Amino acid sequence: MKRVVMAYFSPTHTTQKVARAIAEGTGIGEVVEVDMTCGDCGGFEAAEGDVVVMAGPVYSSRIPSAAAERLSRIKGKGQPAVCVAVYGNNKFGDALIELADIAEKSGLIAVAGAGFIGEHSYANNKWPIAIGRPNEDDIALARAFGKNVIGKIAGGDEWKLGLKALALPGEIPKKPAPKMPFMQSVATERCIGCGKCIEACPAGAIDEKLLCDGDKCIKCCACVKTCPENARELT
């Protein structure tokens, strides 16, 4: 193994933290970080000797459509893929097998998968759903998982016999991920007009007047959690 390619969709950075810990755990010195969160992100072609960590958040038991489309821009030629679903303390549903399907269609082989808990997108002081996750214990588990995965790939007979895809739980979805209920973020009187919410939005749903298009909004709450003045709310 020459490199770890860490590809992720992570509006609120929880998935990013888990993916980084897994990459660290592999012990492979060279890590290539491919952030697929922004709409204008390009594609990436894995090289020989790469291990691809493909990570995404779970919304309503699925990988959101925006994440699925962007992660599919990672292309390979038989490299091993580690599928990682980060969910808000409920369930990851079909997200892992969906990631494996994306990997397969992109020319990768899903040899491992794991679900990790991350702070729920809607979490706040009133609704503290998995607040602060991933925590230190979660990060330690992610590192241990990365070490375990790379140990089995590098130390076993997989390279001699040919890599085989892992049977992950769930059913491969036949339809696009369902749209979330109509909601949109709004600026409160505390807003200072800094525009950080515009930069943070992976769907391009917030305009220059700081108004949110509820049809574009994917309810990731990146704008809410990025705001330095706690001036945005999801209604």
Image: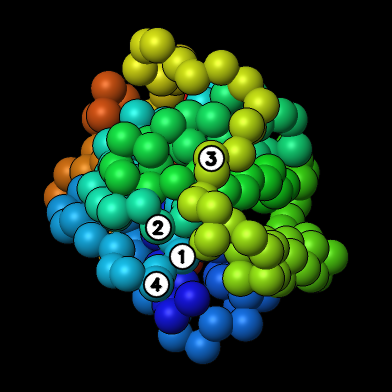
| Residue 185 seen in the current view | no
The reply to whether dot 1 and dot 3 touch (C-beta < 8 Å) is: no
Q: Earlier in the sequence, mark 4 or mark 2?
A: 4
Question: Tag 4: Cα neighbours inside 10 Å, few (<14), some, or many (≥20)?
Answer: few
Disc 1 residue type (three-letter): Val
Pick out the residue farthest to the top: 174
19 or 112: which is nearer to us? 112
SS at mark 1 in the image: strand
**Percent of width and height locating residue 77:** 29, 54
Above or below: residue 142 compared with residue 108: below
Residue at image position (17%, 57%) is 42
Which residue is situated farthest in the right direction here? 137
Identify the residue under disc 4.
49
Crowding at label 3, few (<14), some or many (≥20) Cα neighbours within 10 Å? some
Q: CA distance from mark 1 to mark 2?
A: 6 Å
At x 24%, y 48%, the residue is: 73
Q: Quadrant of residue 175?
A: top left
Report which quarter residue 35 is drawn in. bottom left
Q: Which mark is residue 223?
A: none
Nearer the camera: disc 1 or disc 3: 3
In the rendered image, the vertical position of residue 191 relative to residue 185, given as above or below = below
Q: Amino acid at mark 3?
A: Ala
State left or right for residue 138 relative to residue 9. right
Which amino acid does the dot numbered 2 rest on? Gln
| Disc 4 to disc 3, C-alpha distance | 17 Å
- What residue did someone put label 3 on? 165
- Nearest the viewer among 182 and 72 is 72
- CB atoms of marks 1 and 4 within 8 Å: no
Q: Earlier in the sequence, mark 2 or mark 3?
A: 2
On the image, numbered disc 1 is attached to which residue? 51
- Residue 124 percent location from the top left of the image: 68, 46
